[in-house]
Amino acid sequence: MSPSLTVRRIAADQGAVFRELRTASLREAPYAFGETLEDALSADAATFDATAAEHAVSFIATSFILYTEGHPAGLIEAHFDDTAARRAFVCELWVAPAVRHLRGGELLVDTASAWLAGEGAMETYAWVADANRNAMRFYEALGFGPTGEHRRVARAPEQAESLLVRHVPTTSQVFQQ
């Protein structure tokens, strides 16, 4: 029998869990995130506590945690940018390697996208490093496609990333399927 997976929005008192998952993600895939492991390790616990507390109640940015059999095993952030277009993004996705085969990444993206849609998003965006073919295939399999927008990675200017988008189905489209 496969372990059960659940996703819950981060709670205000989960700064330590947030820190554990963030540092695990940076240890395992340092190339895939906007910060470095050193950044995360040098940040004090209060930084993670403050982010967890803010993400627990914000209507602009939040985090979701994936659990397998009650143990934290993944993380994703969902947020709106501060432009006039108010684009909705998923980012900082990570799932522990031992449970990736259980489709926890898909569950995290779908949960984060549903939260964004509930806050008014019609589309969900994700920046994906061009060199990260696994991530690119993952997002494409979930229905994300290219926008044609590209940029240099801030922490590694020799690398580029592409902006992908997935349209949020309307209620009538969901019921037609």
Image (cartoon, rainbow, N blue to C red):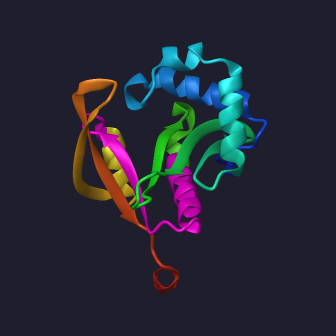
Identify the residue at horizontal 45%, vertical 74% (top origin).
169
User: Residue 6: horizontal and vertical position, in percent?
Assistant: 68, 50
User: Residue 115: horizontal and vertical position, in percent?
Assistant: 59, 60
How many numbered dots are placed on residues in this image?
0
| Image height of 175 relative to 90, above or below | below
Would you identify the image quadrant in which residue 76 lies?
Answer: top right
Q: Nearer the viewer, residue 145 or 50?
A: 50
Identify the residue at horizontal 44%, vertical 69% (top origin).
122
Q: Is residue 117 magenta?
A: yes
Identify the residue at horizontal 53%, vertical 66% (top origin).
117
| Image height of 157 relative to 65, above or below | above
Q: Specify start and end residues of the magenta stretch as a single range.
A: 105-133
Q: Is residue 164 magenta?
A: no
Q: Nearer the viewer, residue 30 or 48?
A: 48
Would you identify the image quadrant in which residue 158 lies?
Answer: top left
Residue located farthest toward the right when viewing the structure as drawn: 13
Q: Nearer the viewer, residue 103 or 92?
A: 92
Residue 62 visible? The answer is yes
Identify the residue at horizontal 64%, vertical 43% (top origin).
65
User: Residue 20: horizontal and vertical position, in percent?
Assistant: 65, 25
Residue 3 visible? The answer is no
Image position of 160 (left or right of 123): left
Image position of 88 (left or right of 139): right
Residue located farthest toward the front when viewing the structure as drawn: 84
Image position of 147 (left or right of 52): left
Image position of 76 (left or right of 33): right
| Image height of 22 relative to 1, above or below | above
Q: Nearer the viewer, residue 132 or 10?
A: 10
User: Residue 166: horizontal and vertical position, in percent?
Assistant: 38, 62
